[in-house]
Image (cartoon, rainbow, N blue to C red):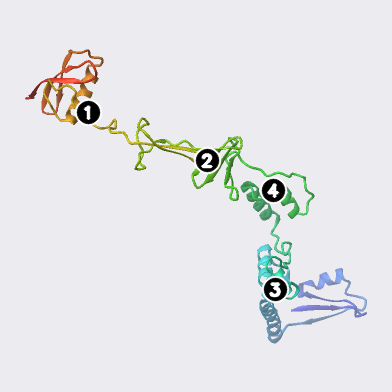
Amino acid sequence: MILNCVFANGQIACSYSRYARLYCSFRYGCYNGATTDVYEHTAVEMQLNQNKVTNAEQIAMLFGLSPDVLSGRADDRTYINSIRTAVLPVVSAFEMALNRALLLEKEKHNKYFIIDTSELLKADILTRYQAYQIGLAANFLQPDEIRFKENLAPLGLDFIKLGLNDVLYDPKTRQIYTPNTDSHAKIDDAGLQNCGEGDIIAEKRENPYHAKDGKFTNAPGGKIKSVTVSDDGIVTTVYEAQAKTKYAPSPQKNHSGIQVKPKTYTKLRGEFNTIYPGSKKGESGYISKGKYRYKVESDGEGGIIIRKKWRQN
């Protein structure tokens, strides 16, 4: 039930519930010629009103808009989504038309029209500041760039913030710079190079000695096969392979004692020199190896003479 209050001059009309009769008389002064009329909405009228609401929502959705945007009830997320679905497709089509009609053929490769929609898509202040914080921490945004986005005056901070853990690499010059140690390095086909006072010095190899077949040798001492100098000033020396390496078993020098295999002799000599270090010539001792026990005598030059051999019980 609705109370319709109409003033005599016909200028003001107000509708209230049936409980507002007393309020109407005091608030608007429904007296001195004012009349009241009580009426009700029929089912048909209520259905027509609901149809109007439904039709308004369908029309909004037809254009990609949320009904909450038109009614003013939309939050930031709903608003931005409506911009993306209703406005940006039209903006994109307009940009394509400008690029197609207003650019010369030679300009279409490196020039284009674009409409700045950052203000339309700007999020709330908390979301923006959280995004700026991530950009600052990752060093792909600088303070003045953020202030420009927020329409603030720049502070004149013309520098890039870097951490001591950062390593800078220039892909054009293939140079590496480490701020923490203030060192430069260069990567080329020969590998990683250390850069000093404008010179390039090759990184020292663990073993620079090569045999004639290209394999590494233990140490220099053989004949020099070749010496080459690269354009960077790197000197490479290739040596002849030595006849014997330090890992090859040594045969017995003294053939007066019991003869054993070179591998067995090497093990016995090493164990004797371990048990009896600094032994003089003629000094002897006993060694057990496997199933046998040996009486060994020093030759005074680091070698041994096996005097006796027997099987252990």
- Residue 97 position (above or below residue 167): below
Numbered disc 1: secondary structure: loop
Q: Give the image location of residue 197, x and y in percent.
A: 61, 35
Residue 142 numbered mark, or none: 4
Numbered disc 3: secondary structure: helix
Number of the front mark, 2 or 4: 2
Dot 2, crowdedness within 10 Å: few (<14), some or many (≥20)? some
Residue at 70% from the left image edge and 63% from the top image edge: 121
Q: For the residue marked with disc 4, what is the amino acid? A: Gln
- Residue 5 position (above or below residue 110): below
Question: If the image is split into quadrants, where does the N terminus sit?
Answer: bottom right
Q: CA distance from mark 1 to mark 3?
A: 85 Å
Q: CA distance from mark 4 to mark 1?
A: 70 Å
Q: Total marks drawn?
A: 4
Residue where numbered disc 1 is placed:
250
Q: Are marks 2 and 4 in contact (CB under 8 Å)?
A: no
Tell whether 71 sits left or right of 231: right
Residue at 20% from the left image edge and 23% from the top image edge: 269
Q: CA distance from mark 3 to mark 4?
A: 32 Å
Tell whether 172 sits left or right of 48: left
Residue where numbered disc 3 is placed:
96
Residue where numbered disc 2 is placed:
193
